[in-house]
Image (cartoon, grey):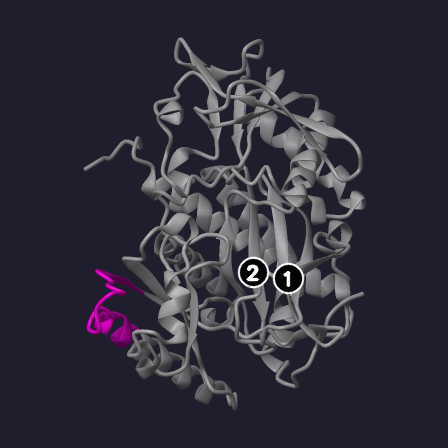
Amino acid sequence: MVPHLTTALTGPINELEQRILESLPAIERWFRLEWMEHTPPFYSAVDVRNAGFKLAPVDCDLFPMHFNSLTPEMMPLAVQASMAAIEKICPEARNLLLIADRQTHSSFYLSHLQRLIQIFTQAGLNVRVAAVDEMMGGPVTLDLPDGSHIKLEPLLRQRGRLGLKDFDPCTILLNNDLSRGTPRVLEHVYEQYLLPPVHAGWGLRRKSKHFEAYEELAKKFAKLLGMDPWLINPSFGHCGQVRLDRADGLEGVKDQVDAQLTKVRRKYKEYGINERPFVVVKADNGTQGLGLATVRDPRELDDMDGPVRRRMRAVNDGRQVNEVIVQEGVPTYERLNDAVAEPVVYTIDRYVVGGFYRIHAERGMDENLNAPGSVFVPLAFETAAQLPKPGARPGASVPNRFYMYGVIARLSMLAAAYELEVTDPEAEVYD
């Protein structure tokens, strides 16, 4: 089952699809050369929005969950991509330690961990699961919905190495987004490979840095294809010194909202798009779809108890919002059973390994779908993301649409590689 587009404004997207297919050899060569110079994030999940007139990523998660939402048919690609990643990082690797998030009370999250364990076990690694919890006295056995179990063990640090009581890993894979900051036990890990690096965690990472890198790449990619980069790039502005507790604490945000809405109106007029533009105000280090608000008029920010300020306050772990990005809103015109849908594309190393559609029956085409009540519909990205059908009529081929989504996701993944290089606190700086 594939969502259908409910808009007739498919001209620019159909043209984009045609250009991508015609340029396939050049695109794949371009990516290949980029990966010779840059290291991909170990894994990622990219939220993509298809407006019919624009196709763009709106988020890139470097600690992806929901691997259990991928179909079993996607496992071979995930295993092969994991093998390729491990061979580059630590060819002699035998043991992998998976550090779990705090959501171990969630059966859905445990099923996700189970899928990760399956992937890396089939990639030839001994896998154990640890928790960063100083109050944890010993191993805990957690039950899964299918009747199986996962053993969660307290993380130990001995003589500068991370591991378990009887387990010394070469590689440590973080599945904890570090939104509370970097625990001391994870600081200054030099003798082992820590993936992703701690500066990819939301305690240090900023969305503005990611979309700066993506904007740069979108321009390069658009030049390669001879097209307008706006068709694949959501414009944005950054705003610091936000004060949600003061009536005048969002003046800078209001200015950015007005500036971004003006830009979008100009592009809508250029492309003959008869839609009312909107922007999304996001916490710059937000996570799990929290701290987001849709805004169509700067005056919506004036109400101290209004819906915009309430949504911006809802950030994970009770952290206060003091920096935001104001991002061009990209509506999603895809529908599945009359519910709005957006594709989420999963990658390991530099490969697209699968994806699903996030569906939310109670949200609109201009709202965040990563919210309670969303469901996931896995789709056959495992072949379509890499095997388009040249010659098919634009807009009519599911494999071509998925290949297009995979290209956009890889652009976002490459932007994450740029971002992590620039923000690496241990990188050497040359004058």
Is-magenta flag for residue 368? no
In this rendering, the answer to whether 155 lies above or below 234 is above
CA gap, disc 2 to disc 1?
Answer: 7 Å
Q: Is residue 121 among the parts visible in the rendering? A: yes
**Where are the magenta residues, as a range?**
238-256
Q: Position of residue 47 (x, y in %)?
A: 56, 59
| Label annotation for residue 374 | 1
Instruction: Say which of 190 and 289 sits in front.
Output: 289
Q: Element under label 1?
A: loop
Disc 2 and disc 1 in contact, CB within 8 angstroms? yes
The image position of residue 285, as x and y in percent, is 37, 52
Q: Which residue is mark 2?
A: 370
Q: Is residue 369 left or right of residue 290?
A: right
Residue 80 visible (yes or no): no
- Neighbor class of circle 2 (other Cα within 10 Å; few <14, some 14-19, many 20+) is some
Instruction: Name the element at disc 2.
Output: loop
